[in-house]
Image: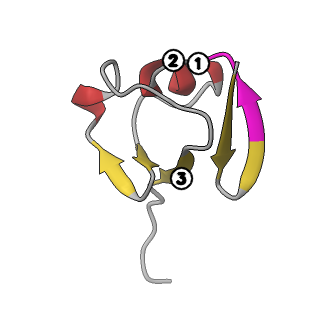
Amino acid sequence: MTTLVINGSTRTVEATTLAELARELELPSRGVAIARNEEIAPRSTWDAVALRDGDRIELVTAVQGGAS
């Protein structure tokens, strides 16, 4: 188990990589960015980015909209 700070809240997860975290959190397959310790990780690297206790994770979801 790994303890992370996700969007400001402490959470314990089973994931050991960003890809596993995305699956564990059931994130959508598109429109989501993940930053680990204030660095955006390209989706192509998620399988290789290891998680460590205390990592700060920010999940950012794209929102579409327009002028009303």
Element type at mark 1: loop
Residue 45 picture quarter: top left
All told, the count of numbered labels is 3
Residue 13 is one of the magenta-drawn residues: yes
Residue 32 located left or right of residue 14: left
Q: What residue type is labelled 1?
A: Ala
Name the residue tied to disc 2.
20
Query: Identity of the amino acid at label 2?
Result: Glu
Residue numbers of the magenta segment: 11-15
Q: What element carries label 3?
A: strand
How crowded is the residue under tag 2: few (<14 C-alpha within 10 Å), some, or many (20+)?
some
Give the alpha-carbon distance from disc 1 to disc 3, as whole Å.
Answer: 15 Å
Mark sitting earlier along the chain (2/1): 1
**Label 2 close to label 1 by CB (< 8 Å):** yes
Q: Do the residues labelled 1 and 3 touch (CB within 8 Å)?
A: no
Estimate the x, y position of residue 52 in percent, counting from the top left: 53, 31
Residue 58 bears which disc, if any?
3
Q: Is residue 21 above or below residue 8?
A: above
Residue at the image point whose x is 54% and y is 47% from the top: 57
Q: Does the magenta stretch include residue 7?
A: no
Q: Which residue lies furthest to the bottom in this view?
A: 68
Q: Residue 15 carries which label?
A: 1
For image coordinates 43% across by 82% down, the residue present is: 67
Q: Which of marks 1 and 3 is nearer the N terminus?
A: 1
Left or right side of 30 for 42: left
Dot 1: few (<14), some (14–19), or many (≥20) neighbours within 10 Å?
A: some
Give the image location of residue 3, x and y in percent: 70, 34
Task: Answer few, some or many: residues within 10 Å of disc 3's Cα (few below 14, many 20 plus, some between 14 and 19).
Answer: some
